[in-house]
Image: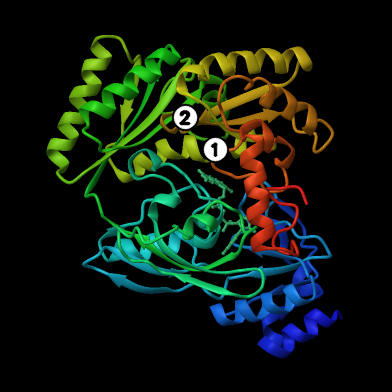
């Protein structure tokens, strides 16, 4: 057994350190069920224990990979057999809720869905919401600056974090647990840890913003004939719903058609329309909210902007609409992409992408769907041949973005998977500054080495 592991056992006790079969019994990630390769999995229970472990690792130049719910899509939390994995699964409590300031203090290992449900019981909405809610953690959401389906109204994870506590590579604890909306005292250090994918420190606790729970949601799935109509309806709903539009998701025809094929999800609308949009608004007066929503949709139907629509009349109806957008198993396995670009380029980009993919290999299919109001599209490319064609598909998907001022990652981050593409979305000076920060905060390069920036 390595000296580092013995030192950690002596500090935290044997039960905090999983070895051998206890490690390999766990999957590599949500996406890869092969046995976890980590040298050991360390499960601290306090920030002080996290600090003690990192101090040892720093002294011995031992690499550490942080694990939340392992749902990330860019292999950021995939450990090799040289890495120790640190999981915050035992730091999973909601500590306090402040009803006057509308804030909650949460430990980083808490599961997103658990946090949402506990707060909902107290009448609060925690608005970050994504398909992985049952497995992903608050720490992972912060480290990846998660987005999800309510970004349009509430912003990304970054917008929810008022303060946080993090531990640096050498074990220094940075307690920056600000609880106020306003605090302009010097550099906003929490931003260093939000979206930096565990490469600058590990987040252990956070102060998050809460919102009043809306009393009703108005949800519609509608079909349109052109991308122009998709964006036109977005503007109409945005302005007429006075900022209460919380989701506006687009699905290109072949995505909708294939996830509603026989044996998969029920198709709420005919399957032959060119584009489908799932839109949702939130409110506090059910009768008037529903009336306004229906009036707007009827007007759009009458003038022909939308071709057909189905409005959810119950929570079961709402779930049946969302499942079409969120549960994409029918089109898996696939090469996944999560890109962003100004909306004016989207339709042209998708057309060019589809053309180039089929010119490359006839049978290639691109499924496109996603958070269009946030400028974010998910692209799934099939058939999937593991790594055989990964580089070639990357070249086409990202190559078609050239000149569009877009980003190769809108939500999922860079991790280890997209590292060679970082420079296509960030300038050389930006990357140099990132590198300087990394060298300053983690001089031995022990935190998630090989993620975000090349070693
Ligand atoms: C079905 C599905 C749908 C998804 N939908 C969305 C979506 O709509 N929007 C979106 O943004 N993402 C989405 N994701 C991606 C993923 O769920 C998010 O990136 C999520 O925030 C990751 O959380 P996690 O706890 O699983 O982190 P992990 O996957 O365990 O880790 C992700 C990264 O964060 C680091 N990390 C984890 N915890 C900490 C910590 N406490 N401190 C520092 N670093 C840490 C890891 O080392 C790794 O680099 C989806 C994933 C799935 C499976």
Q: Quadrant of residue 38?
A: bottom right
Across and down, in percent, residue 167 comes to 58, 70
Colouring mode (rainbow / by chain / secondary structure / one colour):
rainbow
Depth check, front residue: 369 or 147: 147
Residue at left 79%, top 70%? Answer: 61
Where the N terminus falls, by quadrant?
bottom right
Q: Does residue 243 show up? A: yes
Q: What is the secondary structure assignment of the residue under circle 1? A: loop
Question: Taking 81 as reference, is 45 above or below it?
Answer: below
The residue sitting at the top extreme is 303
Mark 2 lies on residue: 375
Q: Residues within 10 Å of mark 1 (few under 14, many from 20)?
A: many
Mark 1 lies on residue: 410
Residue at left 63%, top 55%? Answer: 437
Across and down, in percent, residue 312 comes to 30, 35
Across and down, in percent, residue 112 comes to 46, 59
Residue 331 shown left or right of residue 63 in the figure: left
Question: Taking 236 as reference, is 88 above or below it?
Answer: below
How far, Cα to Cα, is label 2 from label 1? 8 Å
Mark 2 near ligand 1 (CB under 8 Å)? no
Question: Taking 226 as reference, is 115 above or below it?
Answer: below
Q: Quadrant of residue 23?
A: bottom right
Residue 318 shown left or right of residue 416 in the figure: left
Q: What is the secondary structure assignment of the residue under circle 2? A: loop
Tag shown at residue 349: none
Depth check, front residue: 290 or 44: 44
Residue 324 shown left or right of residue 40 in the figure: left
Residue at left 84%, top 82%? Answer: 3
Q: Are marks 2 and 1 in contact (CB under 8 Å)?
A: yes
Mark 1 near ligand 1 (CB under 8 Å)? yes
């Amino acid at each position: 057994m390595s000296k580092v592991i013995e030192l950690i056992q002596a500090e935290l006790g044997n039960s905090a350190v999983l070895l051998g079969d206890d490690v390999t019994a766990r999957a590599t990630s949500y996406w890869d069920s092969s046995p976890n390769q980590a040298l050991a999995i360390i499960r601290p229970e306090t920030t002080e224990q996290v600090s003690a472990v990192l101090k040892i690792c720093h002294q011995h130049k031992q690499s550490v990979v942080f694990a939340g719910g392992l749902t990330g899509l860019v292999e950021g939390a995939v450990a090799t057999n040289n890495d120790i994995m640190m999981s915050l699964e035992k730091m999973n409590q909601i500590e306090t809720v402040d009803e006057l300031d509308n804030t909650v203090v949460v430990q980083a290992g808490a599961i997103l869905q658990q946090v949402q449900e506990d707060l909902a019981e107290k009448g609060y909405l925690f608005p970050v919401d994504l398909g992985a809610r049952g497995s992903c953690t608050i720490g992972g959401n912060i480290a990846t600056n998660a987005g999800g389906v309510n970004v349009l109204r509430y912003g990304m994870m970054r917008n929810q974090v008022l303060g946080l506590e993090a531990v640096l590579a050498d074990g220094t604890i940075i307690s920056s647990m600000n609880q106020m909306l306003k605090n302009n005292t010097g550099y906003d250090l929490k931003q260093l840890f939000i979206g930096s994918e565990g490469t600058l420190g590990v987040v252990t606790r956070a102060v998050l913003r809460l919102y009043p729970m809306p009393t009703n949601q108005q949800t519609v799935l509608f079909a349109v004939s052109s991308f122009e109509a998709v964006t036109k309806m977005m503007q109409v709903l945005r302005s007429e719903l006075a900022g209460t539009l919380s989701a506006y998701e687009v699905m290109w025809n072949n995505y909708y058609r294939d996830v509603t094929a026989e044996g998969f999800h029920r198709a709420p609308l005919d399957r032959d329309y060119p584009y489908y949009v799932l839109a949702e608004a939130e409110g506090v007066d059910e009768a008037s909210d529903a009336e306004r929503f229906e009036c707007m949709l009827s007007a759009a139907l009458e003038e022909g902007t939308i071709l057909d629509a189905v409005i959810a009349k119950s929570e079961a109806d709402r779930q049946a609409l969302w499942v079409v957008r969120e549960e994409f198993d029918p089109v898996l396995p696939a090469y996944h992409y999560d890109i962003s670009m100004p909306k004016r380029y989207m339709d042209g980009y998708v057309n060019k992408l589809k053309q180039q993919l089929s010119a490359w290999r006839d049978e290639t299919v691109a499924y496109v769907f996603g958070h269009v109001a946030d400028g974010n599209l998910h692209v799934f490319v099939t058939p999937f041949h593991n790594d055989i064609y990964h580089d070639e598909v990357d070249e086409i998907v990202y190559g078609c973005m050239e000149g569009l001022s877009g980003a190769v990652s809108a939500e999922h981050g860079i991790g280890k998977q997209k590292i060679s593409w970082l420079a296509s979305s960030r300038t050389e000076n930006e990357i140099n500054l990132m590198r300087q920060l990394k060298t300053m905060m983690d001089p031995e390069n022990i935190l998630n080495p090989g993620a975000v920036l090349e070693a």
